Amino acid sequence: MVATNDRTVTVFGGTGFLGRRIVRHLRSHGFRVRTASRHPDRGHRLFGPDEPQLQSVGANIHDERSVAEALAGAYGVVNAVSLYVEHGRETFHSVHVESARRVAAQALRASVDRLIHISGIGADTASQSRYIRMRGEGELAVRAAFGDALFVRPAVMFGPDDAFLTTILRLLRQLPIYPMFGRGLTRLQPAYVEDVAEAIGRTMQRAETPSTIFEFGGPRVYSYEEFLGAVAHQAGLAPRLIPIPFAVWHALAWASEMFPSPLLTCNQVQLMQIDTVSSPEMPGFVELGISPHSVEAIIQKMLSNCK
Ligand SMILES: NC(=O)c1ccc[n+]([C@@H]2O[C@H](COP(=O)([O-])OP(=O)(O)OC[C@H]3O[C@@H](n4cnc5c(N)ncnc54)[C@H](OP(=O)(O)O)[C@@H]3O)[C@@H](O)[C@H]2O)c1
């Protein structure tokens, strides 16, 4: 049975891949949860009809009034809204900087105690990648608006329904020859999405509030080539991994972006050129008492799901 308390946490993006797990883990820590997204019907499909402990509301983080309404009376807020591909007025700047600032400013105005902003490992205002630069600027904008904000930077996350490992598994099964990004040397440290959601639940419960950046990476750092090899081994496959220069990927992404729903974007290619590994100086799973799951421990469940 879930313990209860009277504290409400609003989760913007609470229907997303990470957000829906954050909602469940906050509930298991006893919080009342208000899931806020542009499509509250998805919240109802995921979590059932509204009840006092768990409600789904419509809110758009670009709209000040709907943000304020979603935050009314809340003890805490988590911003787990994403944007991976820019389109029209939905830009990395508008979502990850301007609207992140809006959520933080409205949280201060609503006297919210605890704000957790989800960013990403490597967020850096000096990066060559516009996406990563905007994540860095977003963190600064949030901290300027809400001094005690907590920041969560996950590494790439995996779990059932993900866009990362599920895609790799599907392609490994379909392609006898697997084209790698570059020579497969980029380093990554995939984190299990449930571990990250549990970490956010524990962070919300902690009594102390100084602004902190947490970085959450899984138990093992792989090169991209090692990672593909480990996944293929678990799936009982032996593909040939072929290096493809990044210049070729950039050309493919450029062509792909001419279509309405690009299969590959320049941003994705840029991200595959950058290591995403947690920094040993930053607090992470260990400080929250969590032993993160390995890819190998979770993959069998995912394999049976994507047969
Ligand atoms: N997935 C990863 O591997 C990964 C790795 C590192 C960091 N992160 C970060 O983790 C966070 C969550 O990522 P995710 O992969 O879980 O995202 P996701 O699955 O794409 O979910 C995004 C959520 O945001 C909501 N949303 C989008 N635009 C909105 C808006 N304007 N107003 C209100 N809600 C909006 C979506 O619902 P509606 O469309 O219904 O509004 C959905 O609930 C992001 O900050 C992402 O950058 C993710």
Image (tube, rainbow, N blue to C red):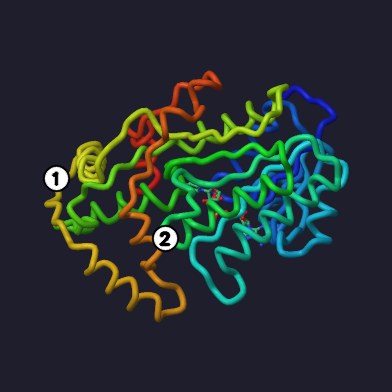
Of 19 and 41, the residue lying toward us: 19
Q: Please, is residue 8 above or below residue 135 in the view?
A: above
Q: Residue at x 68, y 59 (%)?
A: 99
Residue indicated by mark 2? 129
Circle on res. 169: none
Image quadrant assignment for residue 227: top left
Left or right position of 7 against 188: right
Kindly identify the amino acid type of the residue bearing the numbered disc 2. Answer: Ser
> Does label 1 point to a residue whose CB lies under 8 Å from ligand 1?
no
Tally of numbered tags: 2
Sequence-first tag of 1 and 2? 2
Left or right position of 179 against 285: left
Residue 155 image offset from top left, x and y in percent: 43, 41
Of 168 and 301, the residue lying toward us: 168
Residue with the most extreme front position: 126
Q: Residue at x 42, y 53 (%)?
A: 163
Kindly identify the amino acid type of the residue bearing the numbered disc 1. Answer: Ala
Residue 166 image offset from top left, x and y in percent: 37, 49
Gap between marks 1 and 2 measured at Cα: 33 Å
Residue 13 image offset from top left, x and y in percent: 64, 51
Q: Please, is residue 59 above or below residue 78 in the view?
A: below
Residue with the most extreme top position: 289
Q: Mark 1: which secondary structure?
A: loop
Q: Residue at x 22, y 69 (%)?
A: 248
Left or right position of 182 against 128: left
Marks 1 and 2: which is nearer the front? Answer: 2
Residue 82 image offset from top left, x and y in percent: 57, 56
Left or right position of 1 against 228: right
Q: Mark 2: which secondary structure?
A: loop
Residue indicated by mark 1? 238
Q: Residue at x 27, y 56 (%)?
A: 171
